[in-house]
């Protein structure tokens, strides 16, 4: 294949000034990504740029591909050499390949021929692949020096009888021949089995007496846990009672004005305090000490429940739901309800 000149050939002497001038005028139109190389179809030799020759090469490639696909069954026969002829023809065509379309057809033909060759190779049957135990035994006996002309019968360890004379070193000869086939030393073992050794007597296990835990040790941990649980439960009950006191005081100040649930539980300065307020307020709803309802705007409101209403309502009329809140929702509720101060002050804050 002829190679075209690169961009560095501009310094070569020019025989025709007019041709060089025309080429110089065409250089600014070339693409800047080719690094100054104005390679194109016009730079190819006449034979390489002949459209008729290119079409003829592509047509021959297509004919080869079609012939392989159509005569696939015939080419799989071991006596058929058509596949070799196709590959030789493809090698001749490849010498004239100059363009990408022709190279793609050559690659396609190679893929089809490779698949066909692989399938043909799997169907080949080479003589000697099958193992014949009788023939193998005859070869071994001949190698070990069996002489069938001499009278005598040698009895083998397994009870079989071999006609002829087998030398005493026959097995040693076979062992020496087989040594070169193994890199590791053969393991040593007794042909008639090893001696029978009695297992050693089991050692008697001495059981150690475990010390019984004292009553003091039994009581220490449960007492601590019980105190911790009692303290946490007591703190929760106190916080629930404190929030109930806030709810009753706001309700008594103006019984006709509904108390918004979000304005009651949200602390605009602390997200964690808001979650704690929602948690403790849920105990009021669960125990029937407070009730929630929707106002005219379909927004949740909260109000305390009087003692008589608790007994009349009962636990069957109460319903519970799960409230989910995130920092994003918390900020959106603060902006929507314009909450500037919390209605439930922290325990360590003294309010008038």
Image (cartoon, rainbow, N blue to C red):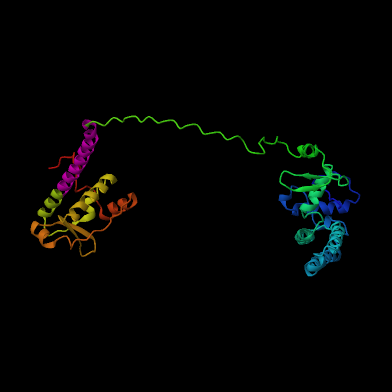
Q: Is residue 324 left or right of residue 53?
A: left
Which residue occupies the extreme right position in the image?
A: 15
- Is residue 66 visible to us here? no
Q: Main secondary structure of the magenta part?
A: helix
Q: Nearer the viewer, residue 21 or 174?
A: 174
Q: Nearer the viewer, residue 209 or 344?
A: 209
Q: Nearer the viewer, residue 97 or 133?
A: 133
- Is residue 193 visible to us here? yes
Q: Is residue 333 left or right of residue 169?
A: left
Q: Position of residue 205 (x, y in %)?
A: 40, 31
Q: Residue 101 is drawn in which quadrant?
A: bottom right
Q: Position of residue 10 (x, y in %)?
A: 83, 46
The residue under the point 81% across, 54% down is: 128
Is 228 in the magenta?
yes
Q: Residue 121 is drawn in which quadrant?
A: bottom right
The residue segment tinted magenta is 215-243
Which residue occupies the extreme left position in the image?
A: 308
Q: How many marks?
A: 0
Q: Position of residue 241 (x, y in %)?
A: 15, 47
Q: Residue 258 is drawn in which quadrant?
A: bottom left
């Amino acid at each position: 294949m002829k190679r075209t000149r690169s961009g560095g050939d501009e310094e070569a002497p020019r025989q025709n000034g007019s041709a060089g001038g025309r080429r110089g005028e065409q250089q600014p139109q070339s693409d800047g990504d080719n690094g100054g190389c104005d390679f194109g179809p016009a730079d190819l030799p006449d034979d390489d740029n002949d459209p008729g020759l290119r079409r003829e090469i592509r047509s021959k490639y297509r004919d080869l591909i079609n012939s392989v696909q159509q005569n696939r069954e015939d080419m799989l026969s071991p006596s058929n050499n058509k596949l070799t002829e196709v590959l030789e023809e493809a090698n001749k065509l490849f010498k004239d390949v100059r363009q990408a379309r022709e190279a793609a057809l050559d690659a396609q033909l190679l893929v089809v021929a490779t698949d066909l060759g692989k399938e043909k190779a799997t169907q080949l049957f080479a003589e000697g692949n099958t193992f014949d135990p009788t023939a193998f035994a005859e070869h071994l006996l001949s190698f070990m020096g069996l002489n069938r002309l001499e009278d005598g019968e040698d009895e083998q360890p397994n009870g079989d009888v071999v006609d002829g004379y087998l030398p005493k070193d026959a097995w040693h000869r076979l062992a020496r021949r087989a040594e070169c086939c193994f890199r590791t030393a053969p393991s040593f073992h007794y042909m008639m089995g090893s001696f029978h050794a009695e297992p050693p007597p089991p050692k008697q296990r001495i059981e150690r007496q475990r010390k019984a835990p004292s009553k003091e040790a039994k009581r220490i941990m449960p007492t601590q846990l019980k105190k911790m649980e009692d303290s946490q439960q007591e703190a929760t009950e106190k916080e629930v009672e404190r929030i109930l006191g806030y709810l009753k005081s706001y309700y008594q100040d103006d019984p006709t004005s509904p108390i918004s649930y979000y304005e009651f539980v949200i602390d605009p300065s602390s997200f964690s305090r808001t979650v704690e307020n929602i948690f403790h307020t849920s105990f009021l709803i669960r125990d029937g000490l407070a009730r929630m309802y929707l106002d005219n705007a379909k927004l949740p409101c909260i109000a305390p429940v009087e003692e008589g209403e608790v007994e009349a309502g009962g636990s069957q009329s109460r319903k519970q739901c799960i409230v989910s809140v995130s920092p994003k929702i918390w900020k959106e509720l603060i902006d929507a309800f314009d909450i500037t101060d919390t209605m439930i002050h922290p325990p360590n804050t003294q309010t008038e």
